[in-house]
Amino acid sequence: VKYGVTRDSVLGLEVVLADAQVLHTGGRTVKNVAGYDLTRLFVGSEGTLGVITAATLRLRAKPLTPPVTFLATFTRLSDVGGAVAAIIRSGAQPSLLELLDRATVNFIEDYRPMGLDRNVAGLLIGQADDSGADEHANRMMAECRANGADTVVHSTDQLEADMLLEARRAAGPATLAQGTTIIEDVAVPRGRITDLLTRAEEVAAECGVQIACMGHAGDGNIHPSIIVPEPTTALLERAHRAAEMIWREALDLGGTVSGEHGIGTLKRSWLSAQLDATSYAVHQALKSALDPLGILNPGKAF
Amino acid sequence: VKYGVTRDSVLGLEVVLADAQVLHTGGRTVKNVAGYDLTRLFVGSEGTLGVITAATLRLRAKPLTPPVTFLATFTRLSDVGGAVAAIIRSGAQPSLLELLDRATVNFIEDYRPMGLDRNVAGLLIGQADDSGADEHANRMMAECRANGADTVVHSTDQLEADMLLEARRAAGPATLAQGTTIIEDVAVPRGRITDLLTRAEEVAAECGVQIACMGHAGDGNIHPSIIVPEPTTALLERAHRAAEMIWREALDLGGTVSGEHGIGTLKRSWLSAQLDATSYAVHQALKSALDPLGILNPGKAF
């Protein structure tokens, strides 16, 4: 979260265009305003404008000091979102700030028991790095305590830090082990995470499905996963209705239907709810300009 | 330099298109991969694709602690670039890292005497902020000393910091006070600043013009200013030849003809040296797609 998303580190690209010409975008400089930002147009275009065959990435030097990692547990889920908003407002710079809700904690304990409290409403795992790590981690932990955290623990060495991160690392496979899942990828303004989590709980009750939330809280990017243990037609229909209700909430909160996973085929119908007719027309005009025959990844993204 | 360029903070735009429709791009989230990155396509397009009428910007909380500012002087210009490269490699995070060469220092002393040593080959003014400021500033100052700096001083309070920054702030008006100037805006990979500065000195000698270099060293973005005290036709011709030789060097070093100022009308011929025919064709295709009648800022940028 401190260093931006991957696209922020892409300085230039080599792209094979629809007519087989090879385009080079960007360069090797940190700043460049010569011409349109073609690099960013192609990054995330999901193969619909050209085939990316090489990328020039910006490297960063390793931080001067190792990170400090902490874990905070909460008895009210709404407090988790409140703590995230308070951390961001405080000026503390998390290098990592991840959220797991009760359902996800229980999936992890089912999958690989590591002594997490199955009764927490949610927990945050955070990290600060570089020279100011202690001060930034302390500030974040103080904001957690001030916003309803029960327990806040922090690492004193790399081994402890790795143990705290282990829960987050297990969350993905542990959730997938529950059966068929529809994994949402919504992102909301970072002050609105509580609203999203609250709505996810309501939707779960309304649709009669289980929804587990985890995600990159520091970015406002949450993955509500709708669990479908037995994928019957009726249950899948309820699950898709739940997914739709959540992305509608994300859009109402000023968010996006996809923070990082992209659109592909699954989320094409969701995209049409986010982009209005004018934006769609601009997308179409750009697509037609660079791929007039429609041969690049047809049927994907939009 | 630590927080990126302005376009990195633009989350969304309102744009009036060529057909008078109003386009909204991006949103209020830190992460968003729904559709093409139209925001970045329009930022820096210099009004050639649409008229930007509103922007949503990402705000950052104020750093937890005030910055530490330092000034380092060098007797060899080549050492200045070497110090910058060493600082970047070291992992130190400058929040500001600016370069002034001897000519610029003398312009400042002519314009507003502040006791700078007119005999330095060049100087760096740097800053580190936030909790790790002391450690990062110390690391940068150590790299300056290890790379040939004569004198390195740092601020102990905000008043001293402001005094050190005063020289940098005066550099622009002081240079413009010298007469007609052609201000280049080249950027090179941050390890190649010395090559660029050396070439600028050669070019000045070869073309018989004065070239003063200052710029955002931490970004590799240097502004060699070609001074034309008496803008005769012959002198202007020599100045334009010098400008061309410098941007050719920047391109040879893997750089760009414009790091931040853009292309406009002055640099249109320079842009054609940077972009190849394929890139030009893509630019033209995008321009035609969004402005088929060519009514948006005609004749500008490319």
Image: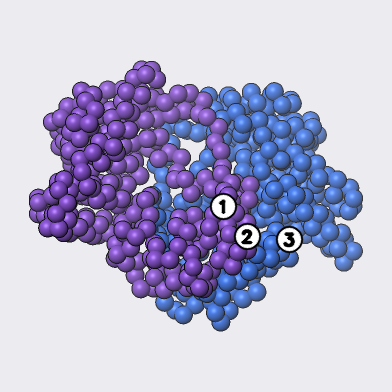
Chain colours: A purple, B blue
Name the residue located 48 percent from the left edge and 64 percent from the top edge. Answer: A296
- Locate residue A283, reporting x and y percent: 44, 68
Check disc 2 and give the amino acid type.
Val
Q: Is residue B179 above or below residue B118?
A: below
Look at mark 1 in the image and give the residue it sits on. Answer: A53
Asked if residue B260 can be seen in this view, the reply is no
Q: Are marks 3 and 1 on the same chain?
A: no
Task: Report the amino acid beneath label 1.
Answer: Thr
Alpha carbon separation for disc pair 2 and 3: 17 Å
Sequence-wise first label, 2 or 1: 2
Q: Amino acid at mark 3?
A: Ala
Q: Using the image, name the chain to which the residue with label 3 belongs.
A: B
Residue at 73 percent across and 61 percent down: it is B273
Chain holding disc 2? A
Q: Provide residue A19's location: percent of width, then percent of height.
A: 59, 67
Residue, disc 2: A22
Q: Nearer the viewer, residue A222 or A263?
A: A263
User: In what quadrant of the picture does the N terminus of chain A appear?
Assistant: top left
Q: Quadrant of residue B89?
A: top right
Tell me the quadrant of the picture where the C terminus of chain A can be found: bottom left
Q: Nearer the viewer, mark 2 or mark 3?
A: 2
Q: Please tell me which residue lies in front, A157 or A289.
A: A289
* Whether residue A257 can be seen here: yes
Say which element carries label 3.
Answer: helix
SS for tag 1? strand
Q: Which residue is mark 3?
A: B273
Give the Cα distance between marks 3 and 1: 24 Å
The answer to whether dots 2 and 3 both sit on one chain is no
Q: How packed is label 1: few (under 14 Cα within 10 Å), some, or many (20 or more)? A: few
Mark 2 surroundings within 10 Å by alpha-carbon count, few (fewer than 14), some (14 through 19), many (20 or more):
some
Q: Secondary structure at mark 2?
A: strand
